Amino acid sequence: MRKIEGFPQKCGLGQPVASITQRQAALWNLQQLGLINPYASALEAVRAVVAVQAQDSVAAACAVAPRTAEEFKLQATLPPESGLVRMWTVRGTLHLVPTEEAGYHQAATVDEWFSRWGKFLDKYLPVPREQVRQELYPQIAAVLEDKPLSYQEIAAAAGLTDPYIRLLPHLMKDLCYMGLCVRGFRDGHRALYMRANYPQKEGLRTRDAQLWLLRRFVECYGPVTIADMVYWSGLRVPVVKELVQELASQVVVVSIAGQDSRALLLAEQLDALLSQKADEELPERYLPAFDVLLLGYRDKSRFLQERFVRRVFLSAGRVAPTVLLDGRVVGTWRRGEAGMEINWFEQ
């Protein structure tokens, strides 16, 4: 395995093989992420961004829509023919992912969830969490075999009592990370859960699944830095550094003007990135809250000026809908009584 010089003992990633501008990087990213030439199907669009933030169902639909040429509507339960599932994955948040890749997401993130992100239940369960995992979770999963159920229906069918009824939303999140169920969208005012309907990756090591996840991220969002990988995946810094070392034979280092950190790109993509037309005409796009374009990068300067970051990334973890013009975020928008209201940034 080829080592990247000076890594991970030092912060550097070795000498870059090319120096590119932020516009070159942005053009490449916008093309890869379906914001210049949309993909033929919603499934292709979701696959191209690895995972679509789906905490909010409307925002998820709005994130897929500009990236595909087909009409895309979310249903309360995603039908098998959609090729998509809604599950918790990176950073402990809900995403839409391709059914065929869901098993990798589950294997890559389950250990992080129980050891790091999902400690809430440890404080409130009356018995050790591992006992609940072994005894109660299979019982809950079994009631989902026939049809999607709401919280109330799950509690009744599984015969739950307090405090398990009160903790059920958190218990169901555990079940999703364990690969026992997936989350549907709302049916009216009801959140729905279904038995996991994606191919399980039995025997897949956590390390190999995490390596797959980071390679997919580099493939779709590169050039990316170590900080970007940590920010997007939620994995620990030492884990990311070790995984990058394992990717060394597949990536090259590039420097991006205006960014201090060197970035990684799949070696097979370098020629295509460098051969792009700098005068590519970029369409105007209206991106939803929590769009993947900005959630993929710790340093937003490729698309958003530093002085405007707090106009997009708001308090309480909120991320505003944005207006993209010529590859740059130039404002935010919202739906008002008179239609779309745009808050342009002062240039």
Image (cartoon, grey):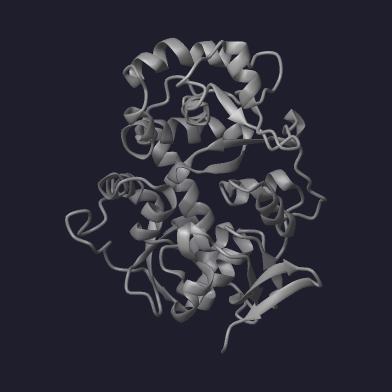
Q: Position of residue 205 (x, y in %)?
A: 38, 27
Q: Is residue 124 left or right of residue 69?
A: left
Q: Position of residue 209 (x, y in %)?
A: 42, 34
Q: Quadrant of residue 283?
A: bottom right
- Residue 125 in the image: above or below residue 29: above
Pick the quarter of the image with the C terminus. bottom right
Circle count? 0
Pick the quarter of the image with the N terminus. top left
Q: Residue furthest front?
A: 162
- Residue 9 in the image: above or below residue 123: below
Q: Nearer the viewer, residue 29 or 187?
A: 187
- Residue 242 in the image: above or below residue 170: below
Q: Is residue 346 left or right of residue 236?
A: right
Q: Nearer the viewer, residue 113 or 165?
A: 165
- For the question of whether residue 99 can be seen, the reply is yes
Q: Is residue 296 left or right of residue 13?
A: right
Q: Quadrant of residue 140?
A: top right
Identity of the residue drawn at 56% across and 47% down: 50
Q: Position of residue 266 (x, y in %)?
A: 45, 55
Identity of the residue drawn at 66% across and 54% down: 59
Q: Position of residue 341 (x, y in %)?
A: 72, 74
Q: Nearer the viewer, residue 137 or 159?
A: 159
- For the question of whether residue 197 can be seen, the reply is no
